[in-house]
């Protein structure tokens, strides 16, 4: 399977069958917390990155192989920004014709300023855009966008989409300690959320390996502040344990590569997953992953994560060099004696 993965346990969407419309890691943002490594290429070009007909044929085959109840949602998400695929509307409609399962789109929301993208995404049941900053400055520093996708366009796009979208709009705020969890930053985000009027606000934390070494999830104090300032509709999304479906792949190693390309996994998580699907072969599978050059181990947040080999994570010196000057004072306490 090239475009479809899972079902995987999703923090918000139960057992979610993922559809990946974009090659790793094609995006118009280069977020400091991205779990998929540095963006390469940073592009705002919309095109048919993969043939829509091939994606839909694979979705059809995978759906046919699952019994009712095994999948809760079909979710467009993956190795970059899914709305950069110019056929996203055709794909949503194509999936709708194949199944009655609800359809979600996880997007950074940056292209909602385009009427055609709004019309395409309006056909989904749930759209989950991001809003990590309430000012243009902080947006540039956290999400590091392509120059064409400005903060004004992001906000205008969210407001315009809310006007036409009858499904659920769940806005995700990724909370990074010292960056957007200050009272000032949160109040600026809240002011925009009040205008957008999402159905829910999900406060998320970078618990998978952030690309930049100095990124930390917000602490308890920051989370409390976020809940207080972002209001009653904000709730914290906790990581969940669930079963990764590794059927449909020729080997456990192929399956793991498919999953970690989209969701890097902690060593323990990977060992548990492999133990269930390939009992007695865990050490063998891990060795094969590493030796075959198809996966890499990334150390972040005090843990070892397995990620796809092409993902690019800078070492600490390069990561620190890319930290915005304005943040260096903020991140220094987080670094202890490493700087
Ligand atoms: S987190 Fe999402 S929007 Fe941000 S760089 Fe990664 S893929 Fe792109």
Image (spheres, rainbow, N blue to C red):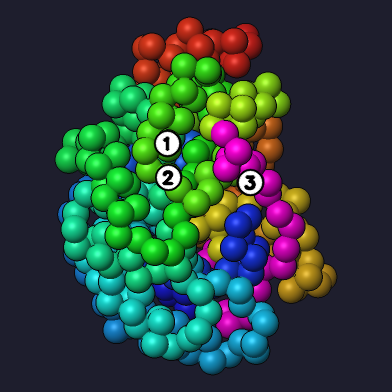
**Which of the 4 quarters of the picture holds residue 241?**
bottom right
Label 3, label 2: how far apart the Cα atoms are: 19 Å
Q: Quick check: 131 above or below 99? A: above
The percent coordinates of residue 195 (x first, y second) are 37, 38
Residue that carries the numbered disc 2 in the rendered image: 197
| Residue under label 3 | 237
First to last magenta residue range:
231-258
The percent position of residue 141, horizontal first and vertical second, equals 36, 25
> Please, which residue is most extreme toward the bottom here?
64
Of the numbered discs 3 and 2, the one sitting upstream in the chain is 2
- Which type of secondary structure does the marked residue at label 3 adopt? loop
In the image, residue 327 above or below residue 276: above
**Is disc 2's CB within 8 Å of ligand 1?**
no
Residue topped by disc 1: 194
For the residue pair 302 and 97, the one nearer the viewer reads as: 97
What label sits on residue 203 in the rendered view?
Answer: none
- Verify CB contact (< 8 Å) between mark 1 and mark 2: yes
What is the secondary structure assignment of the residue under circle 1? helix
**Residue drawn at point x = 58 percent, y = 90 percent:** 65
Q: Residues within 10 Å of mark 1 (few under 14, many from 20)?
A: few
Q: Nearer the viewer, mark 3 or mark 2?
A: 2
User: Looking at the picture, how far across and down is residue 212, in whole percent?
Assistant: 48, 31
Residue at 47%, 60% (x, y): give it: 168
Residue behind label 1 places its C-beta within 8 angstroms of ligand 1: no
Question: In terms of secondary structure, where does tag 2 sit?
Answer: loop
Q: Is residue 262 magenta?
A: no
Instruction: Report whether 102 appears left or right of 57.
Output: right
Residue 232: in magenta span: yes
Which residue occupies 73% across, 63% down? 242
């Amino acid at each position: 399977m090239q475009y479809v993965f899972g079902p995987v346990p999703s923090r918000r969407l139960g057992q979610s069958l993922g559809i990946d419309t974009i090659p790793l890691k094609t995006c118009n943002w280069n977020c400091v917390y991205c779990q998929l490594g540095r963006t390469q290429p940073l592009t705002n070009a919309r095109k048919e990155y993969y043939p829509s007909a091939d994606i839909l044929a694979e979705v059809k085959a995978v759906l046919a192989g699952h019994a009712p109840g095994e999948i809760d949602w079909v979710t467009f998400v993956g190795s970059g920004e899914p709305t950069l695929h110019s056929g996203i509307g055709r794909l949503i409609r194509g999936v709708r014709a194949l199944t009655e399962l609800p359809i979600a789109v996880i997007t950074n929301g940056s292209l909602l300023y385009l009427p055609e993208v709004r019309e395409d995404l309006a056909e989904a049941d749930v759209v989950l855009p991001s809003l990590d900053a309430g000012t243009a400055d902080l947006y540039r520093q956290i999400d590091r966008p392509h120059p064409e996708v400005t903060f004004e366009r992001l906000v205008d796009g969210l407001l315009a989409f809310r006007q036409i979208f009858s499904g659920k709009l769940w806005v995700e705020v990724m909370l990074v300690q010292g960056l957007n969890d200050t009272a000032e930053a949160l109040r600026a985000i809240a002011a925009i959320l009040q205008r957008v009027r999402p159905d829910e606000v999900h406060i998320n934390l970078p618990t998978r390996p952030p690309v930049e070494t100095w990124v930390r999830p917000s602490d308890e104090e920051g989370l409390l502040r976020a809940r207080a300032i972002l209001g009653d509709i904000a709730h914290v999304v906790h990581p969940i344990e669930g079963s990764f479906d590794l059927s449909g792949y020729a080997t456990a190693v192929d399956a793991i590569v498919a999953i970690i390309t989209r969701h890097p996994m902690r060593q323990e998580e990977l060992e548990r997953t492999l133990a269930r699907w390939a009992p007695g072969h865990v050490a063998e599978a891990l060795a094969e992953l590493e030796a075959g050059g198809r996966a890499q181990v990334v150390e972040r947040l005090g843990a070892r994560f397995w990620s796809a080999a092409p993902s690019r994570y800078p070492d600490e010196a390069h990561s620190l060099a890319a930290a915005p000057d304005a943040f260096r004072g903020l991140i220094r306490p987080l670094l202890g004696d490493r700087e």
